[in-house]
């Protein structure tokens, strides 16, 4: 019964982790592009690195928690065993998500401010700064 419960736990947890990583990666890219001042290359690179880190932390957590919990002896024990373990994984995934979103938002705002202050002037900026009626070439 214990081996079966652990295999079910691994299947649910790994599947859930993959689904969450895919969903966050696919839907988070728009947020990252905005946070990084529309630098799509930086946003996509950061997105990939976040997914790798997400997998590492969550897979480590899943593997470490294999050893916790009393071995189930009945189907009712197995359901309680699985709900506790999968619940811990879901909470860990949620904390990881909110931690990442908070860190990205803070870093993205700092980067956007820096890009706004440090970027070189382009033709549109020069034209916008020129007195009205003056065309800059």
Image (cartoon, rainbow, N blue to C red):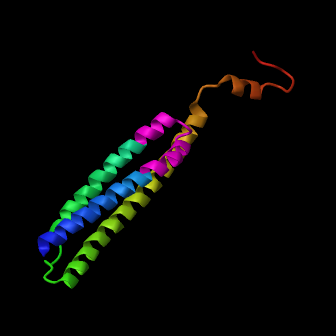
- Quadrant where the image shows the C terminus: top right
The quarter of the picture where the N terminus appears is: bottom left
Residue 90 pos. (x, y %): 34, 67
| Residue at the right extreme of this rendering | 133
**Residue 15 occupies which quadrant of the picture?**
bottom left
> Which residue sits at x=45%, y=49%?
26
Q: Is 47 on the left-hand or right-hand side of 77?
A: right
Q: Is residue 93 magenta?
A: no
Task: Give the percent coordinates (x, y) of residue 41.
Answer: 47, 34
Q: Residue, x 69% and y 22% (percent of image)?
A: 123
Indicate left or right for 50 with 129 as reference. left
Q: Nearer the viewer, residue 72 or 51?
A: 72
Task: Give the percent coordinates (x, y) of residue 48.
Answer: 38, 42
In this view, the residue in front, 29 or 113, is 29
Principal SS element in the magenta part?
Answer: helix
Q: Is residue 126 above or below residue 107?
A: above
What residue is at 24 percent from the left and 74 percent from the top?
Answer: 82
Is residue 38 magenta-colored? yes
Provide the residue span drawn in magenta. 25-46
Q: Residue furthest top?
A: 137
Residue at coordinates 13% horizontally, 77% vertically from top-left?
71
Q: Is residue 21 left or right of residue 59?
A: right
The answer to whether 42 is drawn above or below residue 83 in the figure is: above
Q: Which percent across, then down, holds residue 103?
A: 44, 52
């Amino acid at each position: 019964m214990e081996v079966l419960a652990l295999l079910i736990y691994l299947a649910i947890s790994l599947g859930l982790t993959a689904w969450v990583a895919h969903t966050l990666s696919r839907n988070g890219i728009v947020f990252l592009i905005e946070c990084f001042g529309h630098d799509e290359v930086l946003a996509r690179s950061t997105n990939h690195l976040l997914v790798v880190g997400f997998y590492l932390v969550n897979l480590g957590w899943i593997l470490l928690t294999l050893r916790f919990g009393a071995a189930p002896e009945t189907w009712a024990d197995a359901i309680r065993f699985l709900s506790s373990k999968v619940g811990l994984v879901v909470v860990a995934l949620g904390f990881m998500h909110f931690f990442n979103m908070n860190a990205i938002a803070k870093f993205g705002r700092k980067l956007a401010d820096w890009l706004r202050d440090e970027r070189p002037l382009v033709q549109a900026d020069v034209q916008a700064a020129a007195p009205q009626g003056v065309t800059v070439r």
